[in-house]
């Protein structure tokens, strides 16, 4: 591998001061409830309405402020997400197998009851994030989705976000941001019952709150700054590759970008394109910092090394600008979402195409995928057996328990061996 343009790889790491700060906030919120929620909302957002929850009338008024084209486009994007989530759900089937004579084992998928969805609104009003957590949850069968989004600093809310949350299926909508929003949903405050899973992206304080609340409730995943990796051979268009790199660089000064090229000539042309496009990019103040500190451009010796470099980076988003995408499709292992060919781009996945944009960052793609309908389902097992099978299995189980010195466990097995062992002994019917 030859490095053309070096850069860092920002990993999600808990900063000790952030951890302590969030811990103090959560403890205060837990003890003081809505009084602390209101205090923090005034302090951070200058926002203290009579109720943080929007009424049906306020929701209707917000939606009425949205241009018809925005409403139609949002519906188009959400329909794609919903259709894909329903298709995913169809792959999750209940199971029952007869594992041996008289023994049946099975599993079923049960949706959680309550989900808390956080829709970020910091540097950019990312209203498209609403559908990425709310729609899969509702398709999974979740009864109640509580959705929170931060206020526009000093007053109100972004109508497009409220429209997106409502159309996605949120049952209750709160204009509340940051750690207080996570605490409201996780602890259950006021008329809100505690949720079973927290999901959605946010800043480092939101991410740390999710980390500390994990265990009290489930979470989708821990996500840091966004990332993109691109594998490009000489068949690619350097201008398009540069365009897509900068598309992620504008997110945040800490966003990561990696471009793995197959020739030095292509890499240097891509580097020239990045510099040219940066000069006129409307969001160049952010993108320039991100590219300077976290943009990487390298040349792989061959396709095999390109795969190794990408898998080691384990990007949130991975684009393939190559003549033979099949080679990479069947070899790549670590990525959050894969974009095959120049015809598709990360922005499609972020906004409209139907896959989910809540994805693993900071090399978490080595061990997890992103949010999907299955995130909101519990796969639980069950078992049943005949008396004859219980007698047979019980004898083995009792001997295993004896070796482990778990006498009470052994008794539960032997009592069944004895109950179902004698000829003519009726006993009680085993559950069917």
Image: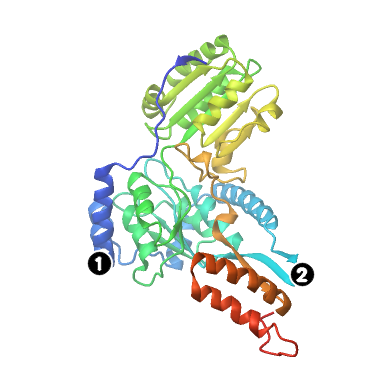
Q: What element does badge 1 sit on?
A: helix
Residue 241 or residue 285, whichever sits in front = 241
What is the CA distance from the residue labelled 2 to the residue labelled 1?
55 Å
Residue 275 or residue 358, whichever sits in front = 358
Image coordinates of residue 426 in percent, x first then y, are: 71, 90
- Mark closer to the observer (2, 1): 2
Image coordinates of residue 190 in percent, x first then y, are: 34, 71
Q: Which mark is residue 113?
A: none
Looking at the image, tell me whether mark 2 or mark 1 is earlier in sequence order.
Answer: 1
Residue shown at the point (39%, 32%) measured from the top left: 10
Residue 38 visible to an observer of this rendering: no
**Above/below status of 82 relative to 145:** above
Are there few (<14), some (14-19), or many (20+) residues within 10 Å of tag 1?
few
**Above/below status of 31 relative to 87:** below
The residue that mark 1 highlights is 31
Quarter of the rendering containing residue 333: top right
Residue shown at the point (39%, 24%) measured from the top left: 288
Residue shown at the point (44%, 67%) measured from the top left: 57
Residue 167 or residue 37, whichever sits in front = 37
Residue shown at the point (24%, 61%) measured from the top left: 28
Image coordinates of residue 271 in percent, x first then y, are: 49, 15
Quadrant for the C terminus, please. Answer: bottom right
Residue 332 visible to an observer of this rendering: yes
The residue that mark 2 highlights is 101
User: In the rendered view, does 136 fall on the left or right side of 278?
Assistant: right
Q: What element does badge 2 sit on?
A: loop
Q: Are marks 2 and 1 in contact (CB under 8 Å)?
A: no
Residue reaching furthest right?
101
Image coordinates of residue 342 in percent, x first then y, are: 64, 27
Quarter of the rendering containing residue 383: bottom right
Residue 346 or residue 173, whichever sits in front = 346
């Amino acid at each position: 591998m030859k490095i053309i343009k070096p850069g860092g790889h920002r990993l999600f790491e808990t900063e000790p001061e952030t951890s302590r700060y969030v811990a103090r906030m959560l403890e205060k919120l837990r003890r003081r409830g809505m009084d602390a929620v209101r205090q923090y909302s005034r302090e951070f957002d200058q926002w203290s309405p009579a109720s943080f929850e929007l009424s049906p009338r306020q929701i209707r008024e917000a939606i009425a402020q949205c241009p018809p084209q925005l409403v139609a486009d949002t519906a188009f994007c959400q329909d794609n997400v919903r259709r894909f989530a329903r298709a995913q759900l169809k792959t999750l089937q209940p199971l029952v197998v007869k594992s041996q004579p008289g023994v049946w084992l099975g599993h079923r998928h049960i949706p959680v009851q309550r989900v808390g969805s956080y829709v970020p609104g910091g540097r950019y009003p990312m209203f498209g994030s609403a559908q990425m957590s709310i729609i899969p949850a509702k398709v999974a069968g979740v009864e109640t989705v509580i959705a929170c989004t931060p206020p526009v600093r000093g007053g109100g809310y972004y109508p497009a976000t409220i429209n997106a949350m409502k159309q996605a299926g949120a049952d209750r909508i709160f204009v509340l941001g940051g750690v207080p929003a996570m605490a409201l949903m996780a602890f259950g405050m006021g008329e809100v019952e505690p949720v079973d899973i927290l999901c959605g992206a946010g800043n480092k304080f939101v991410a740390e709150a999710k980390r500390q609340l994990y265990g009290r409730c489930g979470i989708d995943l821990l996500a840091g700054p966004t990332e993109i990796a691109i594998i490009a051979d000489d068949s690619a268009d350097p201008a398009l590759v540069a365009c897509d790199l900068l598309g992620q660089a504008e997110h945040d000064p800490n966003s990561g970008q990696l471009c793995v090229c197959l020739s030095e000539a292509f890499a240097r042309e891509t580097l020239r394109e990045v510099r040219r496009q940066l000069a006129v990019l409307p969001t160049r103040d952010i993108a320039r910092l991100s590219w300077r500190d976290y943009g990487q451009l390298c040349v792989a010796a061959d396709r095999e090394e390109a795969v190794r470099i990408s898998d080691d980076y384990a990007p949130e988003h991975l684009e393939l600008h190559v003549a033979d995408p099949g080679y990479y499709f069947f070899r790549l292992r670590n990525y959050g979402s894969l974009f095959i060919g120049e015809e598709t781009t990360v922005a499609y996945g972020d906004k409209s195409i139907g896959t989910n944009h809540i994805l693993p960052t900071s090399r978490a793609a080595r061990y997890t995928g992103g949010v999907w309908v299955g995130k909101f389902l519990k796969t639980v097992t069950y078992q049943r057996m005949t008396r004859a099978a219980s007698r047979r299995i019980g004898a083995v189980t009792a001997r295993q328990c004896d070796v482990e010195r778990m006498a009470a466990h052994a008794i539960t097995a032997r009592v069944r061996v004895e109950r179902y062992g004698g000829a003519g002994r009726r006993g009680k019917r085993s559950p069917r």
